[in-house]
Amino acid sequence: MTSYAQTAETQTTEILSSARIILPEFNEFAIQFGNFGIRWYALAYIAGLLIGFYLLKREANKADSVMTSVALDSLLNYVLIGIIAGGRLGYVLFYNASYFLSHPLDIFKIWQGGMSFHGGLIGVTLAMMLLARRHKIPVLAISDRVSMVLPIGLFLGRIANFINGELWGRITDVPWAMVFPHSDGAPRHPSQLYEAGLEGLVLGLVMIMGYRKGWLAYQGRLTAIMLIGYGASRYVIEFAREPDAHLGILFGVITMGQILCLPMLAGGLYLIMRERRR
């Protein structure tokens, strides 16, 4: 049976000459001070959190808002911890558990990369549950507001992935195929841009429309849209995204990213059915 690696090597040989775009190597720092600075991915995290916080602050100032300004101030800290801790531990457990069992101290080296969106989602969910209990606010009311601004961070994060030349797509011969720096030189899907478009722009526009239609009044609706929208987008884009080299395509049919999207889709459908019963 031909392995995924062998198939990829054959494809590379056949279509290497078809690449149209050579992606230049960008500076790893968005803002640099000598040998130190703020990397693109860190800047995406910071910008996503601050823009989201600003928008939620405006919503919290409305007379009929469930979230108070005091609760929102706490939310920023809770979410930040949830993203970093959950994202890192999710990557450790879902994508490279055997390595980190042998090198446990490397878990803390987050500057070397390795964050999982699904792990971050779990971390943020736990953070929202703690916040809801502390401030006596329905957890779905909090998650709806976080879901409303989440596409901003998703968009910026995927653009940062693209600039860093990481998490690229599978080998392809489409006219917009790109050769990424520090790769094997094969033309690949710019899957980071696909994700930025679907998970960021499209899902963001849906959230704007939902907010303007007053969907915040229906607790759980925006959360359901986020779960289904991201889960479906990521599941489809995984067919164009290069699987992790040490995992490949599991069981020959599915990637780890697609497996982790299934609970999101199930959770979103559950919330929709729950609302319909109400």
Image (tube, helix red, strand yellow):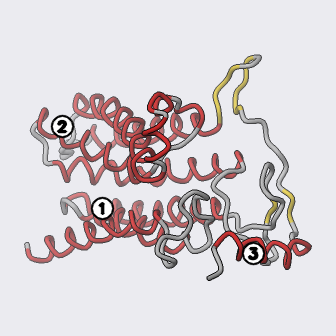
Upstream in sequence: badge 1 or badge 3: 3
- In percent of the image, x 37 and y 41: which residue is there? 86
- The amino acid type of the residue labelled 1 equals Leu
Question: What is the quadrant of residue 113 in the picture?
Answer: top right
Tell me the element at label 2: helix
Residue wearing tag 3: 172
Relative placement, left or right, of 137 versus 164 is left
Question: 257 or 233: which is nearer to us?
Answer: 257
Residue 104 spot, x, y in % from top left: 44, 32
Q: Nearer the viewer, mark 1 or mark 3?
A: 3
Residue 108 vertical placement versus 144 (above, below)? above
Q: Nearer the viewer, mark 3 or mark 2?
A: 3
Residue 47 spot, x, y in % from top left: 53, 37
Residue 244 spot, x, y in % from top left: 58, 58
Residue 228 spot, x, y in % from top left: 36, 69
Upstream in sequence: badge 3 or badge 2: 2
Residue at the extreme bottom of the image, as rendered: 1
| Classed neighbour count for the residue bearing mark 1: other residues with Cα under 10 Å, few (<14), some (14–19), many (≥20) | many
Upstream in sequence: badge 2 or badge 1: 2
Residue 238 vertical placement versus 28 (above, below)? below
- The amino acid type of the residue labelled 2 equals Leu
Relative placement, left or right, of 222 versus 3 is left
Question: How much space separates mark 3 and mark 2, taking CA atoms?
Answer: 45 Å
Residue wearing tag 2: 130
Residue wearing tag 1: 222
- In percent of the image, x 67 and y 23: which residue is there? 37
Question: 189 or 98: which is nearer to us?
Answer: 98
